[in-house]
Image: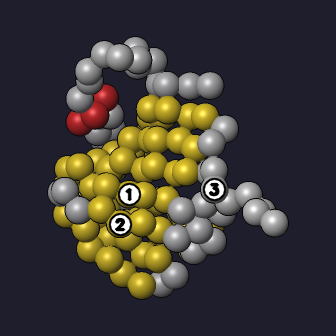
Amino acid sequence: MGNGGLKKSEPFKVLEFIEYVPNSIATKIIIKEITGSISAVSSDSGGLLIGKIVPFDTFIEVIEGNAEIFIDNNSNLLETGQSIIIPAHSHRIIRTINRFKLLSTIIKSGYEDVS
């Protein structure tokens, strides 16, 4: 499906792949497949990613800066190098404390009904 223009089997730096856009939130897809996706997100500052509910677990890793992640109205302060798993079907909001970059990984397989 998609790999954000990256070449497979060639090294790259995620911190350089996603840039800060003044007064904005930017998202770049690294991999997007039927079974899941990996995206890089940057926020210049003071941003708020709209709250939503996703039917899959989401792994978030802050790779630069700090972010506040609300999961079902519970606040979690993450700094560079920290990660969190947002459970499927949880309401989530990501708020910028200062400039940040993060990786978001969604795994869609494993949610099939196993009868």
Kind of residue at badge 2: Ile
For the residue pair 52 and 9, the one nearer the viewer reads as: 9
- How many numbered circles does the render carry? 3
Farthest residue in the right direction? 115
Q: Quick check: marks 3 and 1 in contact, CB under 8 Å?
A: no
Kind of residue at badge 1: Ile
Is 16 above or below relative to 45? above
Q: Which mark is residue 110?
A: 3
For the residue pair 55 and 18, the one nearer the viewer reads as: 55
Q: Quick check: marks 2 and 1 in contact, CB under 8 Å?
A: yes
Looking at the rendered image, the disc whose residue lies closer to the viewer, 3 or 1, is 3
Q: Earlier in the sequence, mark 3 or mark 2?
A: 2
Disc 1 element: strand
Q: Find residue 88 and report its horizontal and vertical position in percent.
A: 59, 68
Q: Specify whether 48 is left or right of 77.
A: right
For the N terminus, give its image quadrant: top right
Q: Earlier in the sequence, mark 3 or mark 1?
A: 1
The residue that mark 1 highlights is 60
Kind of residue at badge 3: Gly
Q: Find residue 74 and report its horizontal and vertical position in percent.
A: 42, 84
Q: Earlier in the sequence, mark 2 or mark 1?
A: 1
Residue in the picture at 38% in, 57% down: 60
Work out how far the residue at label 3 is from the one at label 2, CA to CA, in angstroms: 19 Å
Looking at the rendered image, the disc whose residue lies closer to the viewer, 3 or 2, is 3
For the residue pair 95 and 15, the one nearer the viewer reads as: 15
Q: Specify whether 6 is left or right of 79.
A: right
Give neighbour class at mark 3: few <14, some 14-19, many 20+ (Cα, 10 Å): few
The residue that mark 2 highlights is 84
Q: Is residue 55 visible?
A: yes
Give neighbour class at mark 2: few <14, some 14-19, many 20+ (Cα, 10 Å): some
